[in-house]
Image (cartoon, helix red, strand yellow):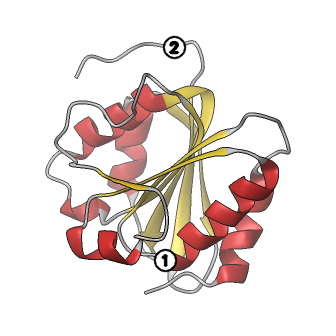
Amino acid sequence: MQIKQNDFEKLLEIIPPYPKTNIFHFNDFDLVSSEVLYDFCKKREYDYDLVCSDESFLKKLAKFKVQKLDIKQPRYNRHAKLYDFVFIMIDIESLEDKKLFFKKIYHICKNSAKVMVFLKNNSHDELENLLEDINYVALNYIDISKDFRVLSAQKMHGWGVYDM
């Protein structure tokens, strides 16, 4: 399933027009979102880091500067870079250790960073509880299409650092 360009562009309206914004995009299934985010970041002069763990989808993203990412690697960022917005477009249900994955995401977020988890339209109470346990706050669902919801969460600024 693909996310429609208009639906994704509407979601980007939450990003304020501040300079030097860093965006991390973990994408394993949606080409349109990568195109839209790439153009959006280029226009606003934001840093855009695109990563992919799916080998077959990685080939579709070849026109972008994309990094192959192994979910099991110890860190997800390069050069200790921190991000203001993190877009996660992977199959969350396929993760062996969801808690460890979101702890790694927590470590690459600036204080008060927004994390946007794209989910198929169904209940994800377990994921909400897990994110709250790791100190994500302001959990909120955004319905962006009939097929997708986005679970928005914010890194609680100035609170706890987690060991992995």
Q: Which mark is residue 31?
A: 1
**Picture quadrant where residue 162 is located:** top left
Q: Residues within 10 Å of mark 2 (few under 14, many from 20)?
A: few
Q: Position of residue 158 (x, y in %)?
A: 57, 12
Q: Amino acid at mark 1?
A: Leu
Secondary structure found at label 1 = helix
Tell me the residue that label 2 is attached to. 159
- Sequence-wise, the earlier of marks 2 and 1 is 1
Q: Is residue 153 above or below residue 162?
A: below
Q: Nearer the viewer, residue 9 or 152?
A: 9
Q: Is residue 82 above or below residue 124?
A: above
Q: Position of residue 134 (x, y in %)?
A: 38, 29
Q: Identify the image quadrant of the N terminus.
A: bottom left
Q: Is residue 127 left or right of residue 12?
A: left
Residue at the image point whose x is 55% and y is 81% from the top: 3
Residue at the image point whose x is 22% and y is 47% from the top: 71
Q: Residues within 10 Å of mark 1 (few under 14, many from 20)?
A: some
Alpha-carbon span between mark 2 and mark 1:
35 Å
Q: Nearer the viewer, residue 130 or 24?
A: 24
Q: Amino acid at mark 2?
A: Trp
Q: Is residue 17 left or right of residue 101?
A: right
Q: Residue furthest right?
A: 17
Q: Which mark is residue 99?
A: none
Q: Nearer the viewer, residue 99 or 104?
A: 104
